Image: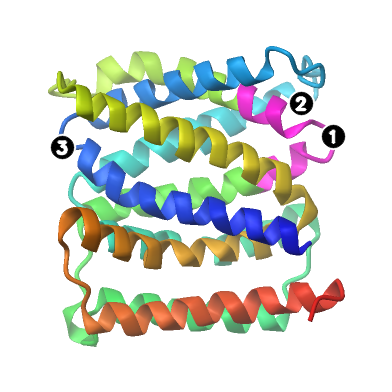
Amino acid sequence: MLKAYTLLTICVVIWGSNFVFGKILVQDFSPTMLTMLRLLFIVILLIGLSANKKHVRTLNKTDIPVVILLGVIGVFINQWSFFVGLQTADPTTSALILATTPILTGVLAAIFLKEKLTLRMLIGSIVAILGIYFVVTKGNSTSLHVDKGLLWIVITMVTFAIMIILTRLLSQRIEPLTITLYSNIVGLVVSIPFAFLLDHPLRISSNLSHWALLIGTAVVVHGVAALIWNNNIRHVDASKASILSNLEPFVAMIMGLVLLSKPITGSEILGSLFIVGGVVLSTYQRKRQYGYK
């Protein structure tokens, strides 16, 4: 169990960095085209990984609709709304919005997976939300301003919660690589027509360094990290695994400072401490339940 949580945390660190990398890429690629291109390279990677894997199998009729739903909502819409939002939204604030995923995931898990909402998880989530609110308002409750891009990030949060639930359901009977491969193929197929219908104007960078960043982040963030996540989420409760996403704002904050020269404010630091405290409080219950000290 400790190993599973460690690997899931690594995934969250990678995904937290993606806020800053995404902010950089949407300056040179239109959002839907960026989504399509990243999915293309992800699928190429997954096909290469699955070439000699005997456990990658065809889907039965009952799993096909769920995989299609996962591909459309959890892959395409999730990534597309993320890049649309980052056109105007601040990376750190976007990460903070996505940190609310555990609340929605916990509700969905209780409804569809019959998982329990523990008091410790609830308290930890409230502590994290307090940190989110403090950072968004910059310590002043009268200064709350919702950027249009943040509304798209909210959609990203909702689709991420749905992705966790659907992946959890499928992972009970299907290997992680199979889930990741087929769902990303669905996402890619769906993204192709929309890349030419939704992006006005259509933007594609001719800079090789931009393409290197696109390919590198696609492979690591949505390829390798997704495989690790799908391979380990089966060992933990979906609602508690998603609480780890609260670490993403802290990662985004540090990466924003390093790559975008975005200063870290006192309210962001204090808010992040609340968020990390919420993560520790929520996941500690899971460790005790399985005998970890």
Residue 207, given in percent of the width and then of the height, sits at 15, 23
Question: Which one is earlier in the sequence, the residue at label 1 or at label 3?
Answer: 3
Q: Which colour scheme is used?
A: rainbow
Question: Residue 77 vs residue 139: left or right?
Answer: right
Residue type at numbered disc 1: Arg
Q: Magenta span covers which residues?
A: 165-182
* Label drawn at residue 173: 1
The secondary element bearing badge 2 is classed as loop
Pointer 2 residue: 63
Residue type at numbered disc 3: Gln
Residue type at numbered disc 2: Asp
The secondary element bearing badge 3 is classed as loop
Question: Which mark is nearer the camera, 2 or 3?
Answer: 3
| C-alpha gap between disc 2 and disc 1 | 9 Å
Residues at circles 2 and 1 in contact by the CB criterion of under 8 Å = yes
Residues at circles 2 and 3 in contact by the CB criterion of under 8 Å = no
Q: Which of 258 and 50 is in front in this view?
A: 258
| C-alpha gap between disc 2 and disc 3 | 38 Å
- Indicate whether 6 appears above or below 207: below
Classed neighbour count for the residue bearing mark 1: other residues with Cα under 10 Å, few (<14), some (14–19), many (≥20)? few
Q: In which quadrant is the C terminus drawn?
A: bottom right
Pointer 3 residue: 27
Question: Which one is earlier in the sequence, the residue at label 2 or at label 3?
Answer: 3
Q: Residue at x 43, y 35 (%)?
A: 77
**Is residue 178 within the magenta segment?**
yes
Question: Which mark is nearer the camera, 1 or 3?
Answer: 3
Q: Is residue 24 visible?
A: yes
Residues at circles 1 and 3 in contact by the CB criterion of under 8 Å = no
- Indicate whether 176 appears above or below 133: above
Classed neighbour count for the residue bearing mark 2: other residues with Cα under 10 Å, few (<14), some (14–19), many (≥20)? some
Question: Which mark is nearer the camera, 2 or 1?
Answer: 1
The secondary element bearing badge 1 is classed as loop
